[in-house]
Amino acid sequence: MNNKLAACLAGVKQTTPLVHIITNYVTINDCANILLAVGGSPAMCEAADEAFEFSQIANALYLNIGTLTKEQELAMYLAIRGAQIKGVPVVLDPVACGAIPHKVDVIRKLQQFGSFSVIKGNQGEIKALAGMEAQVRGVDSIDGGDNVVEACQKAARDFGCVVVATGQTDVVSDGVRTCQVENGTELLTRITGAGCMVGALIGGFCGANRDMYLASAAALATFSLAGELAQEAQGGKQPGTFRISLFDQISQVNQNILRDRSRVKWM
Amino acid sequence: MNNKLAACLAGVKQTTPLVHIITNYVTINDCANILLAVGGSPAMCEAADEAFEFSQIANALYLNIGTLTKEQELAMYLAIRGAQIKGVPVVLDPVACGAIPHKVDVIRKLQQFGSFSVIKGNQGEIKALAGMEAQVRGVDSIDGGDNVVEACQKAARDFGCVVVATGQTDVVSDGVRTCQVENGTELLTRITGAGCMVGALIGGFCGANRDMYLASAAALATFSLAGELAQEAQGGKQPGTFRISLFDQISQVNQNILRDRSRVKWM
Amino acid sequence: MNNKLAACLAGVKQTTPLVHIITNYVTINDCANILLAVGGSPAMCEAADEAFEFSQIANALYLNIGTLTKEQELAMYLAIRGAQIKGVPVVLDPVACGAIPHKVDVIRKLQQFGSFSVIKGNQGEIKALAGMEAQVRGVDSIDGGDNVVEACQKAARDFGCVVVATGQTDVVSDGVRTCQVENGTELLTRITGAGCMVGALIGGFCGANRDMYLASAAALATFSLAGELAQEAQGGKQPGTFRISLFDQISQVNQNILRDRSRVKWM
């Protein structure tokens, strides 16, 4: 199966998918640089005057509701509608949907304009979407991680799409198939934006590949592996240097490295 | 007294204060990463639909008026009201209030919705708030630094809160008690965002401690000391590398280091 | 002629030009840090309530239409009007004007409120503005680079200002004089924001010098040379480390280095 993950990465590098991104301003630069480093083409187009047209010429649309200004919210309704019309895959990052009720209203409203191909959140967010009890604190999950596989599978069936829950082990499910990505490092929790970067990458992988389930798993494995390599390269546990090394290392992850070092448990 | 500063830092690391941040987009990522590195939990919630509710569940609110979009301005009125209702401490960064008259209008209007626990600005900004002559240039203070202690004390009495003026030596006053933090390095003026990062950190320290005067002094000492350590670690005078090292070093500052190396002059 | 470029850099370091910047949120931090590192003073003032007044006290105005929120668009109309009234030079970065029709509408509307001193885009953008066929993909130019000199010269005459097209070789023309800046490294295409940073720097150089043509060439040479030095300092081809090194290196570029290592072909 690792060959399939490697093929997804090759798809990104060969097609340079154009990913239309509407995301929070905290990590918007990180999202652009990580997608560029892996071989994609990010375009942050969030003007309400432009979003409907732009998503129609993109290979994927990534929506992150972290710092949802009113214009971003409107642009998202327009962009997801454009994506729906042209069959462009849509990745949703439901940031803080467990802590802020308004986020859930926006997600429900987005579904009136289009549909999601992938929903990627942390464990608390995905459990909240699955209607299960979750422990959250602001934008962070402090959930123990029980029942995450079940939450992903339930949310995947409820929303009719691939669902990803990130955590010490990442879970991916399309409701039928489920896998766990075991790569990664605790250092990824010590910087802001790891989740956002994964979301942008899933956008890139979905823009370049047909199977959204495999594409999501490949994006997770690529990013988590880059985290491992960055930790190795750096030696220490320093969040600033680690964050920069992440961009260096992901640009070095090729098909061979991904095939050799991915640790995905197919369930 | 250095023991008290160290205790404030311990408070942050033990309680992981959730800091609701509405700040400029220039350094929003730096604010998140520096607060995370010191042990806090940043959450940039600036949607007008969410700010009133979110500040009520936060441990502190940090308002930075640097790039004040209209929605940010409205969100700030809502957020400070929510904070007032629940007794959540509020830290104001009055960016460019000496150069742009509209900033002063916003500050006066914010006071109609709630109150400030700490106001932290550069010397020019604090002197302007104290009604004293100040030399400013855009967002920078080019003030010589005379009468800064007096300006802090006067502003602290006028606004009824702790006032911090950053500069080569930082001054903190609550109108009765006053101190000067002498740690730091000139390199902090060579990067953008040092002031914003300090503001976010003061938010974190105030969210974890009762005495806002001590909490502010401890945040300043922690950050300035991290600057010294970053300069030592790096050797040279290179602003890019220095900026990244700052995140590394602040994550290493613990109670012992802060106790041993803080240079605070209690007046 | 390299002496003239060096004199432009000296102008920046001696006068610390205040540059009013309204730019996209993806690279807003990079723009601030690069301008600071070269000796300028960036101020991101984009509130519609403040932009008209602020551009009038600035030494230059830099407008980048990458992520054009509605409020940014309005602030740009106000800011360019203020600049026009006080004779402040205006640098336009027409991001994605070849891919998104709305961008062209905004540029035409900006011309009703003021005028541009310099327009700086990638090859695809400049060809689009010159009314020539161009290959673009989202925000990137994938144009082969034919006829770029002609495109710059035509656009310079059409818009009555200096026009810069960035690429493997950068072209600068004021319609009469034309030159090519041959410094640079391919690594600058591997990070996001190189174009934006150049735009902010051109703002700084134009704010400190009278001849916008020479100032633009000097800004390009300074930035591209910093790219070469960052590549040399780093050895490898790692985008994360390279990006940080860029800030280090540009702070080291002085008049002597610029005079010795600029490779500008005056046509």
Image (cartoon, coloured by chain):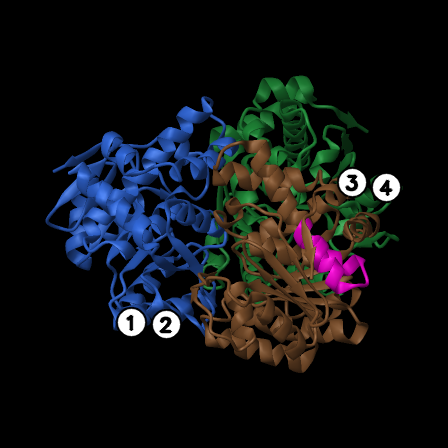
Chain colours: A blue, B green, C brown
Seen from this angle, which residue lies furthest bottom? C112
Label 4 vs label 3, nearer the camera:
3
Magenta segment, prevailing SS (helix, strand or loop): helix
Which residue is at a point 78% across and 53% down the rendered structure image? C1
Indicate which disc residue B145 carries.
Answer: 4
A251 left or right of B134 in image: left
Q: Which residue is more in the foreground, B79 or C160?
A: C160
Which residue is at a point 50% across and 29% down the rendered structure image? B13
Indicate which disc residue A113 carries.
Answer: 1
Identify the subunit bearing mark 1.
A
Q: Secondary structure at mark 2?
A: helix
Residue C206 in magenta stretch: yes
Q: Kindly report the distance in space between the C-alpha atoms of the residues bearing marks 4 and 2.
A: 51 Å
Q: Which residue is more in the foreground, B115 or C8?
A: C8
Identify the subunit bearing mark 2.
A
Q: Secondary structure at mark 1?
A: helix
* Residue linked to disc 3: C256
Q: Secondary structure at mark 4?
A: loop
Find residue A213 and report its horizontal and vertical position in percent.
19, 49
Q: Kindly report the distance in space between the C-alpha atoms of the residues bearing marks 4 and 3.
A: 34 Å
Find residue C46 and report its horizontal and vertical position in percent.
63, 64
User: Amino acid type of disc 2?
Assistant: Leu
* Residue linked to disc 2: A78
Q: Which residues are magenta?
A: C203-221
A18 left or right of C246 in image: left
